[in-house]
């Protein structure tokens, strides 16, 4: 299994299902839930660092925007939802870890009609997680591929919404795993670099940091935006630009970013070395800056 897709610990947890805390083994939803039947729902992944929920407001805002984009009525208001996220972290004794917040359309008929779902629900999971590439990830780096699976077009599914319909990304991730690699980079139908199966991509060329724009099919990641903000504040030049295979094959450095990924350097892509085949110095500097950045950016509890 690719290392970027094996981050969960084995600890048991209490799960929050629409405000009710239940043991993990007892956490259940209806087999008629449209989130299960049709991927009809939205989610967020959120990190906790030292009892500080990283950019909680931004994550909840994005989740509610995602729900609005697919006409999913959220079962509680934003403030109540944030309170339930915090309560779930406390119940599980999370010092540092990962939160998965999900909202589903709820149970309905077997047909596609979302109006048969009368009671949308939410699920909040808070768990400890292992580093994606182990404790020395920043020194090791990842081996990645370019995927033949194209990023779904925004005219098909609203790509800025984090929906439960993730088959597009699952297929790309599976392709990388089957090849013994860590991650897959997906391209738009126009042939431009979009993002990884579950993370954003940055390259560094001649001192300039570049990342694909949203128009390429890239999710407007919260970690991505944090890296851009942090890098610019520390004197780096960052631009959003369309990129092709040529750009990533000739990059001096490449790194991936995401809630679970944080910053993961890339040492090879399609069996081509990135730079000298080791994590680059600029990537290491950004990773060190990011560790400081996350300490106070969010809600402490």
Image (cartoon, grey):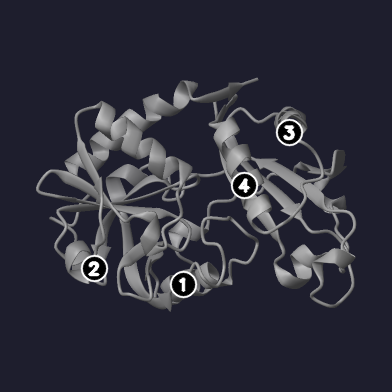
Q: Is residue 105 above or below residue 56?
A: below
Mark 2: few, some, or many residues within 10 Å (few <14, many ≥20)?
A: some
Closer to the N terminus: mark 1 or mark 4? 4
Q: Residue 46: percent from the left, percent from the top?
A: 58, 40
Q: Which mark is residue 65?
A: 4
Disc 1 to disc 3, how far (Cα)?
A: 32 Å
Quadrant of the image occupied by residue 237: top left
Disc 3 to disc 4, how far (Cα)?
A: 27 Å
SS for tag 3?
A: loop
Q: Which residue is mark 3?
A: 92
Q: Which mark is residue 244?
A: 2
Q: Which residue is mark 1?
A: 172
SS for tag 4?
A: helix
Question: Which residue is at 33% across, 71% downward?
Answer: 146
Q: Residue 9: percent from the left, percent from the top?
A: 61, 47
Q: Nearer the viewer, mark 1 or mark 3?
A: 1
Left or right of 29, for residue 84: left
Left or right of 17, for residue 297: left
């Amino acid at each position: 299994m690719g290392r970027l897709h094996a981050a969960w610990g084995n600890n048991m947890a209490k799960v929050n299902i629409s405000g009710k805390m239940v043991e993990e083994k007892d956490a259940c939803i209806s087999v008629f839930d449209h989130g299960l039947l049709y991927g009809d729902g939205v989610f967020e992944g959120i990190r906790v660092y030292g009892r500080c929920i990283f950019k909680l407001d931004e994550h909840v805002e994005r989740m509610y925007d995602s729900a609005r984009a697919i006409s999913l009525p959220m079962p509680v208001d934003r403030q109540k939802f944030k309170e339930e996220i915090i309560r779930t972290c406390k119940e599980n004794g999370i010092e540092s870890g990962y939160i998965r917040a999900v909202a589903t359309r709820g149970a309905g008929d077997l047909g596609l009609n979302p109006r048969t779902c009368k009671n949308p629900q939410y699920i909040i999971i808070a768990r400890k997680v292992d580093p994606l590439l182990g404790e020395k990830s920043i020194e090791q780096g990842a081996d990645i591929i370019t995927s033949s699976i194209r990023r779904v077009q925004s005219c098909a599914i609203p790509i800025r919404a984090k929906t439960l319909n993730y088959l597009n990304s699952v297929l790309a991730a599976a392709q990388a795993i089957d090849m013994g690699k860590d991650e897959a980079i997906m391209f738009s139908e126009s042939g431009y670099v979009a993002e990884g199966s579950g993370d954003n991509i940055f390259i560094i060329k001649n001192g300039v940091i570049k990342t694909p724009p949203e128009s390429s099919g890239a999710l407007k990641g919260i970690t991505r935006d944090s890296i851009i903000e942090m890098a610019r504040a520390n004197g780096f030049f960052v631009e959003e630009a369309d990129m092709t295979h040529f750009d990533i094959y000739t990059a001096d450095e490449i790194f991936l970013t995401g809630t679970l990924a944080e910053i993961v350097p890339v040492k090879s892509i399609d069996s081509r070395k990135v730079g000298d085949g080791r994590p680059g110095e600029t990537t290491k500097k950004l990773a060190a800056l990011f560790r400081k950045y996350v300490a106070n950016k969010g809600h402490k509890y």
